[in-house]
Amino acid sequence: MKWHLLGRSEEFLADVPRSPFCRKRRSEVCGSLSVLKLDILASPLLQLKYQRMLERLEKENKELRKIVLQRDDKGIHQRKLKKSLIDMYSEVLDTLSDYDASYNTHDHLPRVVVVGDQSAGKTSVLEMIAQARIFPRGSGEMMTRSPVKVTLSEGPHHVALFKDSSREFDLTKKEDLAALRNEIEIRMRKSVSEGCTVSAETISLSVKGPGLQRMVLVDLPGVISTVTSGMAPDTKETIFSISKAYMQNPNAIILCIQDGSVDAERSIVTDLVSQMDPQGKRTIFVLTKVDLAEKNVASPSRIQQIIEGKLFPMKALGYFAVVTGKGNTSESIESIKEYEEEFFQNSKLLKNCMLKAHQVTTRNLSLAVSDCFWKMVRESVEQQADAFKATRFNLETEWKNNYPRLRELDRNELFEKAKNEILDEVISLSQVTPKHWEDMLQQSLWERVSTHVIENIYLPAAQTMNSGTFNTTVDIKLKQWTDKQLPNKAVEVAWGTLQEEFSRFMTEEKSKEHDDIFDKLKQAVKEESIKRHKWNEGAEDSLRVIQHNALEDRSISDKQQWDAAIQFMEETLRSRLKDTESVIEDMVGPDWKKRWLYWVGRSKEQSIRNETKNELEKMMRCNDEHPAYLANDEVTTVRKNLEARGVAVDPCLIKDTWHQVYRRHFLKNALGHCNLCRRGFYYYQRHFVDSELECNDVVLFWRIQRMLAITANTLRQQLTNTEVRRLEKNVKEVLEDFAEDCEKKMKLLTGKRVQLAEDLSLCCNIQWTLSHLGCFPALHPKKGFRATFPVL
């Protein structure tokens, strides 16, 4: 005990930085230490006194180290700091937690597993080691609902942060401590599936601070004996299963927490630990609430039996007794330390030598656990590196046999490759020629609005008897159309055209070496980018003015424009006539030629419609200028004529058939008139004075055609100048969001090739890190590692 204290003091002094001030103070501390060496031999009664002196020296050493760490922290931008040993090791454990469980390799690396009965004080012990009240607390209820991996390391500031977050919680501030506890509780509840009470999902937390012992601890849910109301029926078995999964690791250090204030016979965790580590070679036993035990236990020797390992049917590497407060959740770590020190200073257990000085206080426990942890790391890390080397060889062999011509790109590397391809494809949008844009826009816009123009503007105006009424009707309907519908339709067409071109660039195969592994990712990026993109809200207002001005113009300047309008009108009418004849054919069925060649017949309804059509065509031949609608007496006449031939027909069917028959008749006449207007430009220039020929419908189609061209040009400018760039920005934002979303990448980049590359990458990284850990000077006793475990 005596030499252990002195040896540990020299180790702490060896860690003091070599600055001038520190060297001076170190010489003073060494003088005190030499006196300590002489006095400590004088009497065993001075052990407590020298224990406190040692703690004072350690505190001073802690302050000196904090000064140097703060200097390093200020110079962090001047030089690149190396990762600490514990940070490297913790990253390996985090990586292994995501590794394929079928390899079962992550269960063989050391960590400190904190187990105990519910409300035994294990979380309080961990908080004392971390020197901060970081865990949520409750009165008697289960608070630890999932494993929490805590990585302790030394740093200039006392802070905590989660593995998947950049936010730092300042553990010296009450507000940050409360926020950290709340965040841990939220993460625990989120990890628990519906219908369950506990979860096996691990929450990773790093705590840095001056004087913290470097190690990795895992706080597990407390072991329970009875499932109470509100808990899932399998809660007890699930907790046992989680605890066993961590403790069965042959290199895990088991920190067994036992409540000293309850009867030893009520302990559950000791039996569980004795099953997992029968020889006690990696178990450290901790008796909590010793202050309550001393008051309540009639025989103090019973506590001595526990600490000496004679009461429980389990063996341990060492035994400790600690006090973690008075049960008040608002107590600070400093007040708990003072209370613990004061209690053991006045405790009869220590004065009567029932407990030894090195077996008490969480400070000594923390030092002992840290030493044991690093000893276990040193002994196991090289063996694990060799195991991963063999696994890596197997994976590389499988890759060479299955994908001999492909590089080993893991999911993140594949995502970066896909990201570059997608950005190149988006940039290709800016290389589309203006003519291509305008042709697509003009064609798509006319397809969208042609039905409205023909049905709601041209046909109603064409039913009028003179040119003045025709032009008036056209102007009114064009104005209403421009004010209410046309600009919105144009923007919809432009947005649809942009989507179509974007999709074409994203989906077309650039070469024979097209990699279909990116198809799902590209599709998701395309859909999300389109979903986020919003067209400029002011585009419709400016477009409305431009379209209105274009439709107001009736001045056809040359014969070429006139001929173009004639051609546009003729193509439109022919297309409508073809559609109308197709509808009539469906109504009346196949003609005699098709019936004879293809052995098909007419249905009963088609036969009735055919008879009705023939009767209506007779009426149309008698009056070539018949109006668009049938009078009631005409409907009656047609019906009676059909009934005379034994065909019973409904008046609605007659009107429906008439609509298509008249439409075909009108379109044929319009095409004939269009042909006559080919020579009408001369009369147009003279405003059709002294001419029976009127071509106002040609002027209408010229106005529509010109409006389409101007609108396409305007939309093209909006696309190339604004919308393409905004879409490119959206794509970049989507890719950045996807890059941070691991679940999204796992969902979109899938397949055997991806999984094999992912396993190979993880295996290589782990092997490399473990190999470097094996070469770390701190892991070798000859290079400064404190390999001696404290005398327990």
Image (tube, rainbow, N blue to C red):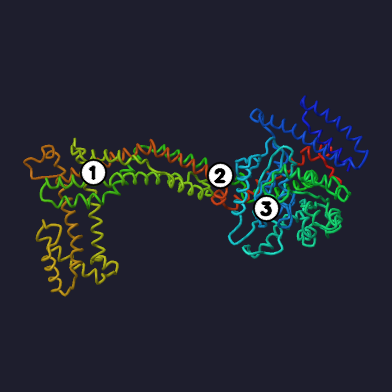
Horizontally, is 31 left or right of 729 in the view?
right
* Residue extending furthest toward the top: 20
* Residue extending furthest toward the bottom: 646
Q: Position of residue 758 (x, y in %)?
A: 63, 48
Quadrant housing residue 578: bottom left
Quadrant housing the N terminus: top right
Ranked by sequence position, the earlier of labels 2 and 1 is 1
- Rounded to the nearest angstrom, the CA distance separating label 3 from label 1 is 71 Å
Quadrant housing residue 91: top right
Q: Residue at x 69, y 40 (%)?
A: 208
Task: Residue 740: give its label.
Answer: 2
Q: Residues within 10 Å of mark 3 (few under 14, many from 20)?
A: many
Which residue in the protein does label 3 denote?
147
Which amino acid does the dot numbered 1 rest on? Ile
Q: Nearer the viewer, mark 3 or mark 1?
A: 3
Q: Residue at x 21, y 42 (%)?
A: 702
Ranked by sequence position, the earlier of labels 2 and 3 is 3
Horizontally, is 707 left or right of 136 in the view?
left
Which amino acid does the dot numbered 3 rest on? Pro
Q: Residues within 10 Å of mark 2 (few under 14, many from 20)?
A: few
Q: Is residue 759 visible?
A: yes
Q: Residues within 10 Å of mark 1 (few under 14, many from 20)?
A: many
Looking at the rendered structure, the number of numbered marks drawn on it comes to 3
- Rounded to the nearest angstrom, the CA distance separating label 2 from label 1 is 50 Å
Q: Is residue 382 visible?
A: no
Element under label 3? loop
Element under label 1? helix
Whether residues under marks 3 and 1 lie with C-beta atoms below 8 angstroms apart, the answer is: no
Which amino acid does the dot numbered 2 rest on? Glu
Task: Note whether 264 is above or below 540 in the view shown.
Answer: below
Task: Residue 704: give its label.
Answer: 1
Horizontally, is 190 left or right of 483 in the view?
right
